[in-house]
Structure formats: C-alpha cells, structure tokens
Image: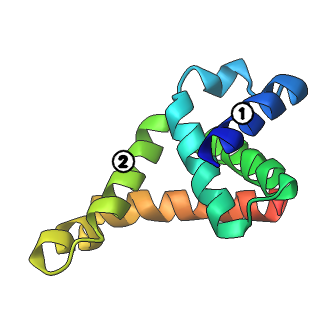
Amino acid sequence: MLTEVLRAIFALTALTGSVTVSWAATYPTVAIVDYVYGCMKANGETRAALENCSCSIDIIASIVPYERYEAAETFRSLGLQTGERGVLFRESAPAKSATTELRRAQAEADVRCF
C-alpha cells in the first residue's frame, strides 16, 4: 500500500507540476511524503485525499520555512513522551511558539485545501 501511495504522490507531482522550485529545495522529499502519507491515513486513502493532502503541504511549505517546520515537528514528537521527559517539549516557550506557528499554517492549509 505504501508503495502505491508513493507512486501516486510522485505521479501527481509530475502531472500537475505542484512542486515549485521555491520550496522544493528546502523541504526534503521524505518530509513531504511523510506529511502526505500521514495526512492520507487521517483523511482516507483516496485520490481526493491525496490531492487535498498534497495541496496542504504545499500551503504549509509556503508559510513555514523547513527549519521551523522541522523544529515544530520535533517538539510535537518529543512532547508525546510522558512525565517530566516530555514537559520541556510541550511547555517551553520555544516549543509553544513553534507548534503554534505550525498549527496556524495547518489551519490555513485546511481552509484552502479541504
């Protein structure tokens, strides 16, 4: 299934030309595919979900530079740890700022793509 999803993502990208030079050089392919794959898992594994999720990462990439996206995803991931291990990654000012910025970009992407 993952192979089929990846093929569909690359085929859609090639056909629509949705990857632009402005952010393609800063967002690694693996980050794009990881986002789209997770988004499709959450929204259904359909062609419409593929298109909406691809649009979503394009919008996010146009709003948030990759370095800040990566920081927000890292804070989010590490914040899932329980107890004192995760509190720093959930409650610190840099963590809150980074995750808030990413949530705002995702909200904008939801409005424009879904």
Give me the residue at 41% from left, 57% from top.
98
Q: Which dot, 2 or 1, sits closer to the camera?
A: 1
Give me the residue at 24% from left, 65% from top.
89
Vertical side of 1 occupied by 58: above or below: above
Left or right of 104? Residue 111 is right
**As shown in the figure, which amino acid type bears the numbered disc 1?**
Arg
Residue 3 x %, y %:
63, 39
**As shown in the figure, which amino acid type bears the numbered disc 2?**
Ala
Among the 4 quarters of the image, the one containing residue 94: bottom left
Q: Pick whichever of labels 2 and 1 is earlier in the sequence.
A: 1
Give me the residue at 57% from left, 49% from top.
35
| Of the pair 102 and 3, the residue shown nearer to us | 3
The way the protein has been coloured in the rendering is rainbow
In the picture of the structure, the residue carrying the numbered disc 2 is 71
Q: Which quadrant is the C terminus positioned in?
A: bottom right
Give the Cα separation between the discs numbered 2 and 1.
28 Å
| Of the pair 68 and 70, the residue shown nearer to us | 70
In the picture of the structure, the residue carrying the numbered disc 1 is 7
Residue 112 x %, y %:
83, 58
Q: Residues within 10 Å of mark 1 (few under 14, many from 20)?
A: few
Q: Secondary structure at mark 1?
A: helix
Vertical side of 6 occupied by 48: above or below: below
